Amino acid sequence: MTSQSYRKPLRKAVFPVAGLGTRFLPATKAIPKEMLPIIDRPLIQYAVDEAREAGIDQLIFVTGRGKTAIVEHFDTAYELETTMSERGKSFEVLEPTRVQPGNLVTVRQQVPMGLGHAIWCARAIVGDEPFAIFLPDELMIGSPGCMKQMVDAYDEVGGNLISVLEVPYEQVSSYGVIAPGKRLDALDGALCEVTGLVEKPKVEDAPSNLIISGRYILQPEVMRVLEGQGQGAGGEIQLTDAMARMIGEQPFHAVTFAGRRYDCGSKVGFVEATLALALERDDMAAEVREIAQRLLG
Ligand code: G1P
């Protein structure tokens, strides 16, 4: 295959949302963690908005038991809309929750066997097309958004792409880490080749401090690699291990995201994201700033 074959347009996005969200219990006992709001939008909405900004409109949710609220969120709520219309209220606020008929598909991951396994569960829906992956815990704020920046890079190099960012070395063991190769001139040097990938390395074994930050554009062949793959770090089927096996077979690049990232899988990161976004909103920034200053004494 020529690299030209790895440039099909990107139309599909997979959102692995089957996780139990134990770090946020008891909040997440009956509510999926992806439905926890940063101000007035659930986390999953930020990820879906980012996908759409990048021109992706086919949404594939890999869900599990107790996760139906996510699908409800993107469905039409007749009772709500009837009541709102009787009261003369605008529906504008619901716009981001609307999905064209047929553009939302869910598959179930019946057993929690890791991110690689979750992605593999979507193989029949992904079919023979490149696809994006969004980990909604990672809230990426940028203009343009992270996936749009990646799609711009994909238009240059095709193949497989991951977004990366730098973290202090002592944090690398919580993430997938890349071995960066040659830097490309395109996109102001934000693009580099990936020569290796390792999931949750020990600090002393880490090939760099550039971590995989939860956004991917992958070619469908990764599904076949996942098919026969055994357990990796933490006894889970790791997407990082499957991607590592694609290096050398297909183009593989990393884009350094120009923007801000909030780790909403952690409570402190969640608070940080809430505060940061509130301080940017015209409808509340002034008030929130005043409150924050008062609280800080
Ligand atoms: C997953 C990926 C890891 C990536 C991280 C980003 O890890 O396996 O490569 O760096 O997401 O948040 P998890 O957070 O599921 O352990």
Image (spheres, rainbow, N blue to C red):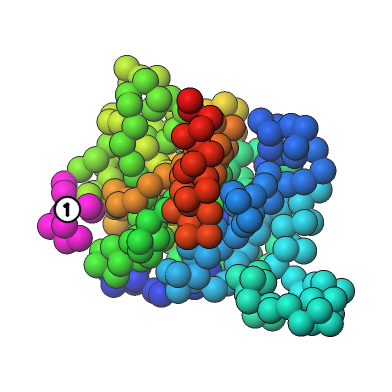
Q: How packed is label 1: few (under 14 Cα within 10 Å), some, or many (20 or more)?
A: few
Position of 157 relative to 166 (above/below):
below
- The residue positioned 28% from the left and 63% from the top of the image is 153
- The residue positioned 53% from the left and 54% from the top of the image is 284
| Magenta-colored stretch includes residue 272 | no
* Dot 1 amino acid type: Gly
Residue at the far top: name it. Answer: 204
- The residue positioned 69% from the left and 79% from the top of the image is 90
Magenta residues, as a range?
182-191
Q: Where is residue 188 in the image (x, y as percent from the top left)?
A: 16, 57
Q: Where is residue 132 in the image (x, y as percent from the top left)?
A: 48, 60
The reply to whether residue 226 is visible in this rendering is no
Residue where numbered disc 1 is placed:
189
- The residue positioned 60% from the left and 60% from the top of the image is 45
Front position in the image: 295 or 33: 295
Residue at the far left: name it. Answer: 185
Front position in the image: 226 or 119: 119
Q: Position of residue 56 (x, y in %)?
A: 49, 71
Front position in the image: 77 or 239: 77
